[in-house]
Image: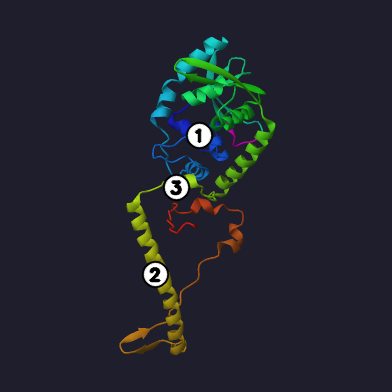
């Protein structure tokens, strides 16, 4: 399957890809087109098809456009012919990786990055930048290799970094991936992080403050309403009552069906009968 095609993007929803790992590990530093970092919560929404996220920025577009040039530079340096390939973990069914290149013998993979000057200098020191480390370890896990190359390309210069499989790090990665995938399978929303929010201006604060005030007054009114209704019900002696042109009527309706106790529905996945998801906004003051 060709990478970055609509079919490839749809397929990725059913797996945790290597580029998802930095997000789940909390080391991803790159922002989407709207200025937010992609977080585990946003990634979860994307996997379930609840949102379509635009991750294409000028930097990502440049990196994609330069990938073939960088790959050719790497091939000249190593005398290896590299081809892109999608690989899957041998034991973990939801783990996959889209390799930028793997040689014909399929014993050496490479992750190619068209890097910033800062990241390029990190590679010059023989180290993979932290925000890419989870990605290459994920790729090593999916290929089953003990070593791969991280290739940093900047202004025509290429630097190769040998990356060895990091077992302690992979143990932590496996645990966090399993935790994330459980959220996906159970359709349970992961907790939000600070990166799930965009800092807004003073105009936003004014409206948010006004809405908080209205909600607080509604809460107080709800308490008052309940107290008055309890008193009125007592005065009505639990029967329909009227006075001064006002009627107070008691009506009864059937309770909701408890589907969990229906024997015929045992073992049936009721999620397929759910209506479309709805969004709920919650407003509350942050703790100081």
User: Alpha-carbon distance for marks 1 and 3?
Assistant: 28 Å
Residue 197 circle label: 3
| Numbered disc total | 3
Q: Indicate yes or no whether the magenta region holds residue 108.
A: no
Q: Earlier in the sequence, mark 3 or mark 2?
A: 3
Tell which residue pokes out farthest to the front in this image.
288
Q: Crowdedness of circle 1 by 10 Å Cα count: few (<14), some, many (20+)?
A: few
Residue 212 in the image: state x and y as whole percent. 40, 62
Q: Examine the image and state in which quarter residue 35 appears.
A: top left
Mark 1 falls on what kind of element? helix
Give the number of the mark in front: 2 or 1. 2
Residue that appears at 55% across and 22% down: 123
**Residue bearing the label numbered 2:** 217
Residue that appears at 39% across and 32% down: 57
Q: Earlier in the sequence, mark 1 or mark 3?
A: 1
In magenta, the rendered stretch is: 92-96
Magenta: main secondary structure = loop
Mark 2 falls on what kind of element? helix
Q: Indicate yes or no whether the magenta region holds residue 93.
A: yes
> In terms of depth relative to the viewer, which is nearer, 225 or 29?
29
Residue 133 higher or lower than 216, as above or below: above
> In terms of depth relative to the viewer, which is nearer, 88 or 145?
145
Q: Examine the image and state in which quarter residue 62 appears.
A: top left
User: Alpha-carbon distance for marks 2 and 1?
Assistant: 48 Å
Pointer 3 with pointer 2, Cβ within 8 A:
no
Pointer 1 with pointer 3, Cβ within 8 A:
no
Residue 128 higher or lower than 279, as above or below: above
Residue 91 in the image: state x and y as whole percent. 66, 34
**Residue bearing the label numbered 1:** 11
Residue 121 visible to the viewer: yes
Q: How is the image coloured?
A: rainbow
User: Alpha-carbon distance for marks 3 and 2?
Assistant: 26 Å
């Amino acid at each position: 399957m060709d990478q970055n095609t609509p079919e490839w993007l749809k397929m990725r929803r059913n797996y945790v890809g290597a580029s998802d790992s930095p997000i789940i590990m909390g080391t991803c530093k790159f922002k989407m087109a709207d200025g937010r970092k992609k977080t585990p919560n946003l990634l979860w929404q994307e996997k379930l098809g609840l949102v379509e996220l635009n991750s294409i920025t000028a930097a990502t577009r440049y990196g994609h456009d330069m990938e073939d040039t960088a790959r050719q530079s790497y091939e000249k340096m190593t005398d290896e012919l590299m081809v892109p390939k999608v690989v899957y973990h041998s034991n973990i069914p939801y783990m996959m990786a889209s390799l930028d290149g793997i040689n014909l013998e399929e014993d050496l993979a490479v992750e190619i990055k068209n890097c910033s000057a800062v990241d390029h200098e990190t590679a010059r020191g023989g180290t993979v930048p932290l925000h890419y480390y989870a990605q290459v370890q994920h790729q090593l896990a999916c290929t089953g290799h003990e070593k791969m190359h991280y290739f940093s390309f900047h202004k025509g210069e290429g630097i190769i970094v040998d990356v060895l499989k990091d077992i302690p790090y992979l143990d932590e990665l496996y645990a966090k991936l399993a935790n994330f995938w459980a959220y996906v399978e159970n359709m349970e929303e992961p907790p939000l992080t600070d990166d799930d929010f965009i800092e807004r201006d003073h105009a936003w604060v004014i409206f948010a403050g006004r809405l908080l005030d209205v909600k607080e007054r509604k809460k107080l009114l709800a308490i008052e309403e309940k107290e008055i209704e309890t008193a009125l019900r007592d005065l009505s002696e639990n029967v329909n009552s009227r006075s001064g042109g006002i009627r107070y009527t008691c009506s009864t309706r059937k309770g909701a069906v408890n589907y969990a106790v229906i024997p015929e529905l045992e073992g049936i996945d009721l999620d397929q009968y759910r209506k479309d998801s709805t969004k709920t906004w919650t407003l509350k003051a942050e703790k100081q």
